[in-house]
Amino acid sequence: MSTRTTTHTARDATGSTARTGVRLSLASLRAHRRRFVGTFLAVLLGTAFLSGTLVMGDTLRGAFDTLFTDAGTGTDAVVRSEDEIVVGDEQPIREPVETSLVDGIRALPQVAAVEPDIRGTGRLLGADGEPLGGGGPPTTAGNWINDSALNPYDLVDGRAPERPGEIVVNRGAATDGDLAVGDTTTLLTPDPVRVTVTGIAVFGGEDGMGQTTFAGMTRADAERYLTATPGQAESLLVRAADGTGQDELVAALAPLLPDGVEAVSGEQVTEENLDDIAGMFLSGFTMGLTGFAVVALLVATFSIHNTFAIIVAQRTRENALLRALGATRRLVVAQTMAEAAVVGAVAAGVGLLGGLGIAVGLQALFPAVGFPFPDGPLVVKGGALALSVAVGVVVCVGSALLPALRAGRVAPLAALRETAVDTSGTSRGRTVAGALLGVAGVGLTAFGAAGGTGGGSVTLTVLGSVATLVAFVTLGPVAAAFALRALGGPSGARRGRRRARGARGLRGARGLRLNVSLARRNALRNPRRTAATATALMIGVAVVSLFTVFGASLKTSLDETVSRAFAGDVAVRAPGFATEGTDLSPDLAPAVAGLPEVDTALGLGRGVAEVEGDGEQLTVTDPGALGRVLDLGEVTGRLTGLGPGGVAVSADEAEAHGWGVGDTVALTFADRETSELTVRAVYEQDDLAGDYVVTREAWAPHARQDADTLVAVTFADGVSTEEGQAAVAAVAAEFGNPEVQTREEYAASAGEGVDLMLTLVYALLGLAVLIALLGIANTLTLAVHERTRELGLLRAVGQTRRQLRAVVRWESALVAAFGTVGGLALGGFLGWALVRATDSAGTGAFTVPPTQLAVVAVVGLAAGALAGVRPARRAARLNVLRAIATE
């Protein structure tokens, strides 16, 4: 803003402070638009990611709401068991209801139709013989419901199944598996069943719920393959007669139902399904995305603060002139705050449009990497947009607050002096305060991670991590001074005292050293600015490093756990992210055991039961042979001879309940039958065996579909791994072609989900790093403007354009190096703390992945150097005479 504009505007300072501040800010923005480009982009990107996250969350909720509402439109009431067993965050398991209730319900005048709903596990094989569906979403099978209003699936091609072996599949599975009407394939129930596709269906108008697959068969086939005994269903679906409301229908059904069976409205079931989706997936998903948005906005805060700090420092003389002409401190502060508010509001408004693009991108990104989302239009709510704009403005204004207050403290006499850039930031008070906070933060983090209160405390670790981060920011200017001197090298200081006189003749190593030295001295001129610029990048790199270290440690822990606990030579498992899949036929293990190459082939199934009111997972197997394929550690009692009345429990579970060998444990199964089992053995290692082990004889009366999740195989003496694996794979191909993995491959497969998580983390954190790099570029651009006269003098005494560009680029690289190294150190430390704090069992491994962290470092340095390209070109284009004449 010119002196004339400043003088003219200040004359109006007798008016309203706010109005005058706005006029001053608008005049300044018009005069110096380029100064605020970095701030504008930082707010824009941060707001875009936040609004995109909120829109994505609303879109998903709306899509699932529409999906379940449309699918359940014709169902007015559901008859089901009252009790359920919930294990962890899995779907609740209910006792089946008797289909004999159908005739009595159908006779009610309030009922138009009633159909049994039989559901179970059924994995389809595609045309190439490979299993369909992802590692996480369910692969289901059930009876095809002939009443179209009660059936959530609608036929879009072919016909319903009429004869044994006929099925209808959802369109998503048909597309993925290259299946069409008339094709023959295999359905694993878990025993392989040859089936013919007679129809293609959609669920609520969609191809399917993400990677979920469905195979609809005749009722007779469903009872044969999916239930323990005929005459049972998961629930009964009821459609009301015309003129009958859902509540009236529920009331009419109640007298017909036996004890333990209830009738609930279709609306209630739909809401429960939505709550289950929200509880298991949507809430965590949206919170995770919001966390990334917070990181991006935090990085933007440092970039914005740095921009306004530089602008205020560069306008010291201008602000002093305003004060000399009668402007109050309040007016000067209001001008800066108004500039921040205008930039924030405009950038946040534009960011809303970017948020819509990000939401569309997320809709495409997550299904592409294996996260199933239903299709649906974007849901844009006014509350989400208003919140995004408000956050963008608050972040921008809040970031400018301290620079604005500093501008208001400028004395009028400063107008008579040369403009001075703020060089504070390395004061003794800052050093002492930062050091004390750092010691407290590191100590609290280490205390929480090490379990000083009797176990790792995530809360203490998080609090300590926040304090450590604040200490890093506080000590940034002090650390920057030391780090930049170190990066300049021991001889850089002496060479840096040389002037640019004769620089035209410097080539090769000497020229490089001079450029680096000049860049280092420029960065050291204002440690606070350098630290603030680098801090934005440091936070982004720190979060990336934290997740990299945590992910690598988690993979190592899983690898070591499986390697330690699995004593077999190969493992046969169905697809899945965990170490145990699903859908393995219980006949597979005996078939493999009959091979001459095999010594032991043991199937491990899975069951559920309530123990003292809590849902627990059971391992169903032959306990006597378990020790030959799994390392159970020290065993008290005997695993052999458990029979239908015995159970083996882990040492931790036994200690928690006060059980010992010979005690009685009551297990209540999903069919509400309670069995009193005697503890026959207590084993030490529960990594793969779980907390409870029962025999198939004990589980069989309560099982709906008998299935194994894993078959562990040991080879006979003298059989090589390659020979044995080939023999097992040949047999497994007859049972749906499950994966046959060596011990090393089985251990490595435990980290599949971690790799997916890290891929998403890197993609999402890329925005935070981009904002940080924009901050570096903007800071350098403003610094070039600030040093216009100095750069002109350097050019006048012989510095070439090429050398000037190199100096600016090296300054950018040095700032990026400081931020990257600090981020790696902080992220590594916090990663260690998080690993220790979450390792309740004390068996986790801390791993520092050198290759991944080296890639992070290289990317940070390279991106930092790239951020300096544009400011370097701008500096090199300066006219020498005009630059020297600049005030």
Image (cartoon, rainbow, N blue to C red):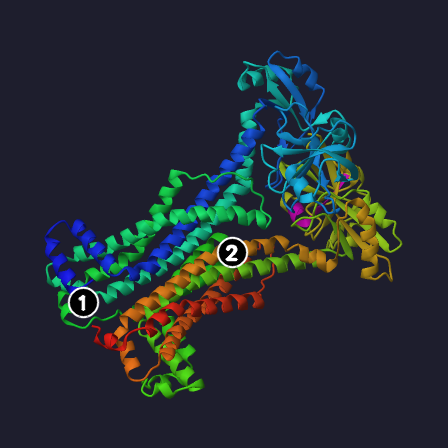
Q: Is residue 529 above or below residue 768?
A: below
Question: Which element carries disc 2, helix, strand or loop?
Answer: helix
Q: Nearer the viewer, residue 647 or 195?
A: 195
Question: In x, y percent, where is residue 539?
Answer: 43, 61
Indicate which disc, 2 or 1, sits on the residue closer to the N terminus.
1
* Residue 745 visible in rendering: yes
Q: Nearer the viewer, residue 628 or 111?
A: 111
Residue 652 on the magenta segment: yes
At horizontal 38% and vertical 75% (from top left) the residue drawn is 805
Q: Quadrant of residue 159?
A: top right
Q: Residue at x 50, y 54 (%)?
A: 457
Specify the quadrant that holds the C terminus: bottom left
Residue 441 position (above or below residue 740):
below
Q: Amino acid at mark 1?
A: Arg
Q: Position of residue 270 (x, y in %)?
A: 55, 29
Residue situated in front as seen by the camera: 229 or 141 = 141
Q: Which residue is mark 2?
A: 763
Query: Is residue 454 in sight in this rendering?
Result: no
What amino acid type is highlighted by mark number 2?
A: Ala
Q: Quadrant of residue 422?
A: bottom left
Question: Percent from the top left, x then y, of residue 5?
Answer: 16, 60
Q: Which residues are magenta?
A: 646-655
Residues packed near mark 2 inside 10 Å, few (<14), some (14 to 19) or many (20 plus): few
Residue 36 lies, with reference to residue 159, above or below; the image says below
625 horizontally vs 403: left or right? right
- Residue 345 magenta-drawn? no
* Residue 265: x %, y % from top left: 56, 23
Q: Which residue is mark 1?
A: 317
> Considering the image in quadrants, where does the N terminus appear?
bottom left
